[in-house]
Structure formats: structure tokens, C-alpha cells
Amino acid sequence: MSHQVVGLGQCALDLLGTLSRYPGVDEKAELHEVLIQGGGPVATALVALCRLGVETAFWGRVGDDDFGEKIRSGLEGEGVDCSGLLSDSGRTSQVAFIAVEGGSAHRNIFWHRGSARPLEPDEVDPGILGAAQVLHLDGLQRGASLAAARIARSRGLITVLDGGTFREGTEELLPLIDHPVVSERFARSLCPDDPLRAVDLLLYRGGLAATVTLGALGSHTGSREGERFHQPAFLVDAVDTTGCGDVFHGGYIFGLLQGWPLKRVVRFAAACAALKARKLGGRTAIPTLAEAEAFLAERVDA
Ligand SMILES: Nc1ncnc2c1ncn2[C@@H]1O[C@H](COP(=O)(O)OP(=O)(O)OP(=O)(O)O)[C@@H](O)[C@H]1O
Ligand SMILES: [Mg+2]
């Protein structure tokens, strides 16, 4: 198999709508734009990598319902190999309603877990890793994530974690992760008063480089060699920030595959995430490589 990146994680179907202002309780609001699109941190990062020209494969599980079919076809339509995406008979897929407030780009997410079971460690087929260079995880599906990370380590793959929430099993997973790239929420679980200190803690727990992302405030990165820097977010007319973090990870992994210096990796990731924010949906405006390069060439502000 020729995948360069294999991802294991949660996937969902997003039902998105844009409104002018959030309604009060018992009020109605008209949606100006609606969209149904696949989501999930690792799944959307793999879509970003496909747009950038990288071959990817996804491990996960959906229910055998219509939502699961849409999740699968959304990934396959982008070129993600879904031979490792299992379907749980008689169970339902994860789904989210996302209400985006136009102008502010704030969003409220209402989500349902679904009843599809997490992947089990013995369902992680080492064959899918093939000749991959990177394994990308979101830390959900604890047992399977640990099993995959151990196999990846034994084969010398680079491991990347999208840490959204610090959860049960995260502590065990961190020593197996080369590049933890985590949300502010995750960082505050480690260091409630100073999320940036989480960079040091993540390096201490085994990371080669660690990043905390702070939404429109950009991100902070540190490396084991002692490098430290802030990458501002690129200023764009943000319509919807759903999936910015996911796409940041896709761009970051792309940079790792190129062997770029860390600063270039993170700047590229920030550009991909900013470009994504131009349209409704986690995936709609994910750039191609040519678009990302053209954007970076003309932007000296960040
Ligand atoms: N409004 C914005 N404009 C430009 N870039 C943004 C904006 N919001 C986020 N980004 C970029 O995306 C990166 C990741 O965003 P964020 O920290 O919100 O991720 P997250 O917490 O994982 O969110 P999610 O998982 O919901 O996408 C930021 O560091 C920044 O580079
Ligand atoms: Mg995230």
C-alpha cells in the first residue's frame, strides 16, 4: 500500500447552517445557508492532506445508517482510502448540528455520539500502515489508538496527536507521540493558569515538538532542541472556523512529510487553517497546495 499518512479516529456527519443571530429560547431563526458534510478531527485532517496531494487511509467505525454512508462517501470522494473504516451493523453514526453565526463566525455545536462501538485494539490491522510515514490520532477510541501508536513506534513512523480534550487514556498515549498539537482546552487541563506551559509539559512527556493552538490568537510551539515561537493566525474574512484545528493538523503533517524546519511547518499549517475559514463547513474551503503556496507568497503579515 502506498499511503503516506494513516489516521485513526472519530468521524461524524456535520449538518451546518448559517444564521444572522442566535435566537432566544422558543424562538425561530432562518438559516441562510445549509450544508451536510463529513467531519471529525482526524478524518478532516486526512481530507486536507488529500487536497494537498498526499495519499491517506482512515481507520474508524461508523454505524450502518445513512449518516455512516455519507461519512464514508465524503471521505472516498476526496480520495481517502476507507478500507479500514468499519461499519457497525444495527448501530448509528455520530452526528452534529452546527449553528454558525454569520459575521462573528461563532458557532454552537449540538452533537450526538451515536451507538457505533469504538474500534478495538485487535481491529487495528498493521497491514494498513504499509509503508506509511505518519500515523495521526485524536486520542479517542483509547485501546485502538494505543495499539496503533505502539505499532507505529515499532516501525519508526512519525506519530501526531490532535489533542482536543485531555481524556482517559491520553496520559498513556503521550509517551508514544512525537508531535502533540493540542487545543487550548487540552492545554488548560494540563496547566489551568498558563496553557502555554503545556508546551513544556508535552515535551517532557515525550514530544519532539509540541504546539498549543489558540484559535484566532494563533499558536505556540516548542521543540526539544529549545526552539520556542508564536505563529499568529492569518487575518482572513472568517465565515466559519469549524475544522480549523483539524485542517491545521493536515497542514502540519504535510510540512513534516516535506522535512521542513518547524517554523515553516507551523506557518504552512496556519495558512491552511485560515484558508479553510473562508467558507461554511470544515472541508469546503480546504486549499490545494497551489492555493496554499500562492496565499503564503503574498502574505507577510503572519
Ligand atoms: N478566525 C480564524 N482566522 C484565521 N485562522 C484561524 C482562525 N481560527 C483558527 N485559526 C487557525 O487555526 C488554528 C487552530 O484553531 P483552534 O485553536 O481554534 O483549533 P481547535 O481548538 O482544535 O478547534 P477545532 O477542533 O474546533 O477546529 C489556529 O492556531 C489558527 O492558526
Ligand atoms: Mg481541534
Image (tube, helix red, strand yellow):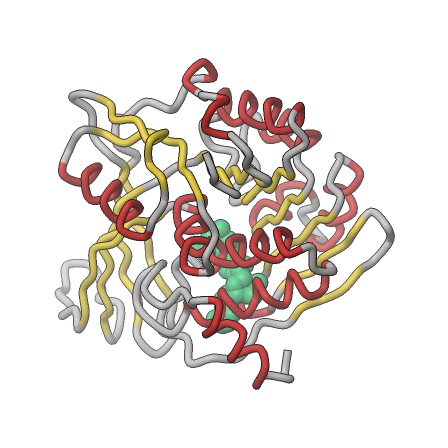
Please tell me whether residue 106 is drawn above or below residue 76 in the rendered image: below
Residue 279 appears in the figure: yes
Residue at position x 70%, y 45% from top? 191
Q: Quadrant of residue 51?
A: bottom left
Q: Is residue 248 left or right of residue 302?
A: left
Residue at position x 65%, y 27% from top? 155
Q: Quadrant of residue 212?
A: bottom right
Can you give x and y, in whole percent of width and height, for residue 143 in the image?
50, 20
Can you give x and y, in whole percent of width and height, for residue 205 in the image?
75, 35
The quarter in which the C terminus is drawn is: bottom right
Q: Is residue 203 left or right of residue 232?
A: right
Please tell me whether residue 44 is drawn above or below residue 137 in the rendered image: below
Residue that sits furthest to the front in the current view: 1
Can you give x and y, in whole percent of width and height, for residue 244 in the image?
46, 60
The quarter in which the N terminus is drawn is: top left
**Observer-nearest of 43 and 84:** 84
Residue that sits furthest to the right in the current view: 226
Can you give x and y, in whole percent of width and height, for residue 273 in the image?
49, 65
**Observer-nearest of 148 and 188:** 148
Q: What count of labels does the image hold?
A: 0
Residue at position x 66%, y 44% from top? 179
Residue 215 appears in the figure: no
Residue at position x 20%, y 44% from top? 70
Residue that sits furthest to the top in the current view: 122
Q: Is residue 33 left or right of residue 248?
A: left
